[in-house]
Image (cartoon, grey):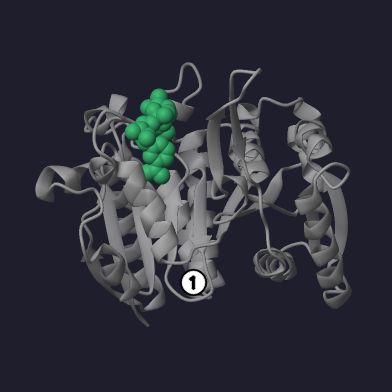
Amino acid sequence: MNYKIALIRGDGIGPEVVGEAVKVLEAVGKKFGHSYELVDVLMGGCATDAVGKSYPDGTAEKCKACDAVLLGAVGGPKWGADKPAEQRPETALLAIRKDLGLYANLRPAALRPAMADACPLKKETALKGIDLMMVRELTGGIYFGKRDKYETADRGMEATDLMAYSEMEIERIGRRAFELARLRRGKVSSVDKANVLETSRLWRSVMHRLAQEYTDVQYEDVLVDNCAMQLVRDPGQFDVVVTENMFGDILSDEASMITGSIGLLPSASIGDSAPGLYEPIHGSAPDIAGQDKANPIATILSVAMMFRYSFQRPAEADAIEGAVDAVLAEGWRTPDIAEPGVTPIGTRQMGDLICQHI
Ligand code: NAD
């Protein structure tokens, strides 16, 4: 196959980690007979420097003409909150998600076998294994609701944020979760706060309707406070966890912490039509940029997700994930994950070793 992939290298360590991911794409291409058309797309602080805007005109169109988008990271102190919105990299991130219609954020939290010691939970919990997929609704809920701030007569200032969800928004993310569970271990845990919130009661009723349809998938409701506890008590019980935007924002960070390192975790944001956006969960790490210290694994595993979810090529995804596990099992570590006494390797060497294993 020939795949057309947009590369948003971005800022800080973004270009370094995307560079290693490109090497991995080439290694996979060689092994499985694929070729690529790689399209560089300028976005983020580097775009502000080059053309005065973090999200240059035509960015979405360039990405839409591709089969998938790979993003390193954008942002940095140079383009901080004092800058106008169109110059800030965060503006570009929100804009591209909206323009590509990416309503589902998939964040796997898997403890890689060789990294069990990095898990901050009890050893017996880590040994049971952690392999869950957090599915977060990305374009609705309180982050996008009407907000207001006003003076009251007797209580000073008051502020409100509206949380709204429609059946359509709930159903499309719910279907994603059930379909994903079919590709995994066949279980969906839907997280809400139905004992308090009206939006959660609607969420739950739509999920129950879907559960009747996907009878081959095991289904459960979990209250968000209980889910936060269960994630540290027994994360191995979860397979696919689906939830609304704000709960997902918080729970996905909690889930990533239990797997050890921010440098190891990929993510995907997908909508109904191509292309999906694949990116590591970490930021641009300006403190280590340009020093060959960044861990490229999160970006490389994002490429594995691209093969699995955008290209429906599980063998290629397995080959990448297997190579990462093999390199970690041999004891190779970048500085962020090196145990005391281990001499770390650099970004480029880590990329090379993973390619060799592919
Ligand atoms: P960060 O994720 O960039 O860094 C947090 C810490 O983790 C730093 O100490 C960094 O050195 C380390 N780290 C991150 N990724 C690493 C890797 N691959 N290998 C080794 N160490 C790694 O978060 P931050 O410092 O809060 O943010 C820095 C900038 O990134 C900010 O401008 C922020 O807005 C931006 N950001 C961008 C995205 C994105 O592009 N999607 C996401 C989060 C933050």
Residue closer to the observer: 80 or 22: 80
**Which quadrant is the C terminus positioned in?**
bottom left
Q: Residues within 10 Å of mark 1 (few under 14, many from 20)?
A: many
Residue at point 35% right, 71% down?
Answer: 29
Quadrant location of residue 147? top right
Amino acid of disc 1: Ser
Horizontal arrangement in the rendering, residue 121 relative to residue 79 (left or right):
right
Q: Residue furthest left?
A: 50
- Where disc 1 sits, the SS reads helix
Q: Quadrant of ligand 1?
A: top left
Residue behind mark 1: 310
Residue closer to the observer: 333 or 67: 67
Q: Is residue 307 visible?
A: yes
Residue at point 37% right, 83% down?
Answer: 1
Q: Is residue 329 visible?
A: no
The spot of residue 91 in percent (x, y) is 34, 46
The spot of residue 262 in percent (x, y) is 50, 35
Horizontal arrangement in the rendering, residue 147 relative to residue 289 (left or right):
right
The spot of residue 165 in percent (x, y) is 68, 58
Residue closer to the observer: 163 or 203: 163
Above or below residue 268? Residue 44 is above
Above or below residue 103? Residue 153 is above
